[in-house]
Image: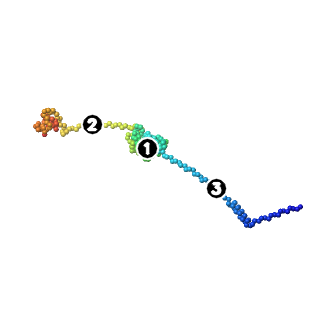
Amino acid sequence: MHSTPAPPSRPKLKLPTWLTVVLSVFAVLFILGAVFGKQAPTPEPVAAPVAPPPTTSATPVPVTYTVDKITDAANIELAGSDGSHRTVRILGLEVATGNNCYASETAVWASNKLASAAVKITTDTTDGVALALSDGTDYATAALSAGYARLSGNVVSDSLRTAANAAQQAATGLWAEPCKGVITAPTPVPTPTPQKETPAPPPAPRTSEQAAPPPVEDTPEPEHVYYKNCAAAKAAGAAPLHVGEPGYRSGLDRDGDGVACER
């Protein structure tokens, strides 16, 4: 049995050396490009955090007050700039009211100080408030210093106590007569002091120089004899004229001694 002869093998194709070198270089470049030339993925842009809008906290406008009504020197009504209305008591004050001693003087003073005045609440408690006047003066201190109020018992303020003590020691306002610090009773009426009648001095005795001239009787003159003046009487030869003689009249007797036209 004859075996089939194997087909003749094809001769291997041999590339030129230069081509082999070129292909080898391209192969190396391809590998290097695959390893090192791969670009990193471009990161997506991250949006910047949006800052929240600034919170504008509006500063509350302070409320200002005006005195709307004065009940007495320690109790008033205030009208606020925000439309509010408050009835307040002044801390530290005890004042006379009604017909009590020094009430009318205190009411006039409080009206002059507070009527329609702009005030500021400096202390606000459940027991009352402290007020400052437009010039910065503390109202309670002014009332105590001038003697228009007494210090209430529940106050521990040194400044108010000092003002009250100074007024009391100086006997100012309600601490003077007739109240003497008592403002819960009517004004005492002073008892009039009876005045002694002074007898009239006796009349001074008359001296000789002060002796009254004797009364001159006005005797009616005869109607048929009349002298216009002493010159006429002298011209007629009738001077001097005595009382009762024709032509005598008191108008010619200047010194009233009863003899007319004696000179």
C-alpha span from label 3 to label 2 = 130 Å
C-alpha span from label 2 to label 1 = 60 Å
- Point out residue 53 in the picture as x, y percentages from the top left corner: 56, 50
* Residue pointed to by mark 1: 117
Colour style of the rendered protein structure: rainbow
**Secondary structure under the numbered disc 1 in the rendered image:** loop
Check disc 3 and give the amino acid type: Pro
* Residue pointed to by mark 2: 199
- Point out residue 141 in the picture as x, y percentages from the top left corner: 43, 45
* Residue that appears at 66% across and 56% down: 41
**Disc number at residue 218?**
none
Which residue is most to the left?
237
Label 2: how many Cα within 10 Å (few below 14, some 14–19, many 20+): few
- Point out residue 59 in the picture as x, y percentages from the top left corner: 51, 48
* Residue that appears at 19% across and 37% down: 212
Left or right: 214 with respect to 163?
Answer: left
* Sequence-first tag of 3 and 2: 3
Q: In this orientation, which residue lies closer to the viewer: 247 or 138?
A: 247
Task: Kindly indicate the quadrant of the structure image that contains residue 198.
Answer: top left
**Secondary structure under the numbered disc 2 in the rendered image:** loop
- Point out residue 25 in the picture as x, y percentages from the top left corner: 71, 64
**Disc number at residue 43?**
3
Looking at the figure, which quarter contains the C terminus? Answer: top left
